[in-house]
Image (cartoon, helix red, strand yellow):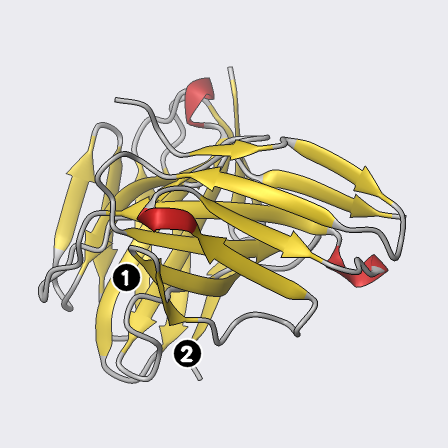
Amino acid sequence: EDQVTQSPEALRLQEGESSSLNCSYTVSGLRGLFWYRQDPGKGPEFLFTLYSAGEEKEKERLKATLTKKESFLHITAPKPEDSATYLCAVRGRSGGSYIPTFGRGTSLIVHP
Amino acid sequence: EAGVTQFPSHSVIEKGQTVTLRCDPISGHDNLYWYRRVMGKEIKFLLHFVKESKQDESGMPNNRFLAERTGGTYSTLKVQPAELEDSGVYFCASSQEARRQGPWEQYFGPGTRLTVT
């Protein structure tokens, strides 16, 4: 069974204070690792898909990296508007065709 | 382009009653998914439609849940009769026709918060 563990559960940063969120996973034959951002009262918003170890993707202040056991979401010089819950999900060979397994998320608060 | 929409945004019902949730996917998206998030836990898959056909319904909790997708457009998820443990946020997501290499980008709706009392 695929598993995803995200840490920390909650993170408070000062504006401009860079940090990283962790997503550890176990999956049989990774077919994609996904990062989403979720704002209160809204659905998850797609950020990145990573497919293989060593792959990196960037979007504004966010950079996602992938190893064989975990993924990191690096946030550089965050702003208050980056405050949200960040979700990680994986899809593996053992799962259904298009079914991701989600972690519980990291709640990020960036103080001005 | 309009995103995924869900109705209602909130629903409060009593145990034993029936509730129907609706999801309108992004136009042209063949794939439609239902998920549920129970408070304090992760988002869990319920089922997946490809057009009007159920591709995978392995996540449906029990036979009190019935999902339909009329003509491959909008979808409904009916809970009958509702139980206390059915409370949670129900999300719908859609994606374009799946390709072998992905990227399997799913676009989520805002969710329906269901409270069963």
Coordinates of residue B57 in the picture (x, y in percent)? 46, 71
Does residue A98 appear in the picture of this structure? yes
Instruction: Please name the residue shown 11% across and 60% down the image.
Output: B99
> Which residue is identified by label 2?
A2
Q: Quadrant of residue A93 in the image?
A: bottom left
Mark 2 lies on a secondary structure that is loop
Mark 1 lies on a secondary structure that is strand
| Closer to us: A3 or B26 | B26
Instruction: Please name the residue shown 64% across and 64% down the image.
Output: B65
> Which residue is identified by label 1?
A33
Instruction: Please name the residue shown 89% across and 55% down the image.
Output: B15
Q: Amino acid at mark 1?
A: Leu
Q: Are marks 2 and 1 on the same chain?
A: yes
Coordinates of residue A9 in the picture (x, y in percent)? 58, 52
Does residue A20 appear in the picture of this structure? no
Coordinates of residue A71 in the picture (x, y in percent)? 30, 60
Residue B83 falls left or right of residue A82: right
Dot 2, how many residues are within 10 Å of its Cα: few (below 14), some (14-19), or many (20+)? some
Labels 2 and 1: the sequence-earlier one: 2
